[in-house]
Amino acid sequence: MGQFADKNVGIAKPVTLSLTGINVNAANYSFSQPGNLTANIIQRALTLSGTPFAVSRPYDATVIAQISGATINNIVSGDTVNLGGTFANPNVGTAKPVTLALTGMDKGNYSISLPTGLTANIIARNLVVTADNASMMFGGPIPPLTYTLGGAGLAGTDTKNSVFTGLLAVNTTGVNPGFTAPITKGTLTLTAGAGGNYIISSFVSGTMSVQ
């Protein structure tokens, strides 16, 4: 019997011979490996059932595209091989091209012919901006105005500084101690870069308490 060191595809892979059988006993038999035996393991061909299509999704800062509608066949039991898709970039867009490919830890041991021309949409990620309540002394300086993000929140390595520009605003003119003023959206808006992957679905004003 011959054995490779591993199951993976390769050219001129070393093969080790050994005795097998129910009557094999090391004390009764001797065996010498005859030279350097090698052989090839070639990729196993897979087939595709159904018609794959890429699923549109909200922006998530990755290039991963979910694929549905098709199944790959002829995978060896126990191997991990799947059908996946990728966008060229993670940004929002309509009818973005999606490239199909095999994924999974054993993908290199298989080959398959995959269709081209798939597209899907990446839609803007929903954000809810809520101004944080604050307080100040009458006649004193206005403290920094901050906000909290809700909705789907920021994705990946995106930050408030990369996604937003501008500042919240509050007008405390004529507001006496014990009264409040609304904290408004002011000039806060999405940037032309990373902010283009988001949409502010709503803004919730805060309250400035004057003491």
Image (cartoon, rainbow, N blue to C red):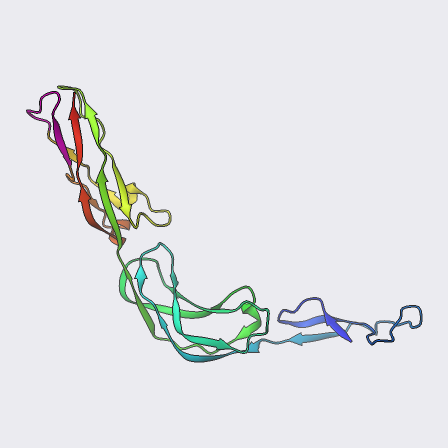
Q: Is residue 173 magenta?
A: yes
The dominant secondary structure in magenta is: loop
Which residue ends up furthest to the front in the rendered image? 178
Residue at the spot x=52%, y=65% of the render?
A: 104
- Vertical placement of 167 versus 92: above or below? above
What is the x, y in percent for residue 102? 48, 69
What is the x, y in percent for residue 71? 45, 76
Residue at the spot x=9%, y=21% of the render?
A: 176
- Vertical placement of 188 versus 18: above or below? above
Q: How many marks?
A: 0
Q: Is residue 31 left or right of residue 91?
A: right
What is the x, y in percent for residue 18? 81, 72
Instruction: Locate residue 105: give its quadrant.
Output: bottom right
Which residue ends up furthest to the left in the rendered image? 174
Q: Is residue 112 left or right of residue 87?
A: right
Pick whichever, 8 or 146, lies toward us: 146
- Vertical placement of 109 versus 186: above or below? below
What is the x, y in percent for residue 73? 51, 78
Instruction: Locate residue 86: give its quadrant.
Output: bottom left
Q: Quadrant of the C terminus?
A: top left
Q: Quadrant of the N terminus?
A: bottom right
Instruction: Locate residue 119: give its quadrant.
Output: bottom left
Q: Is residue 3 magenta?
A: no
Pick whichever, 198 or 39, lies toward us: 198
- The stretch in magenta equals 172-183
Pick whichever, 4 or 183, lies toward us: 183
Q: Is residue 108 left or right of residue 190?
A: right
Q: Is residue 141 left or right of residue 14?
A: left
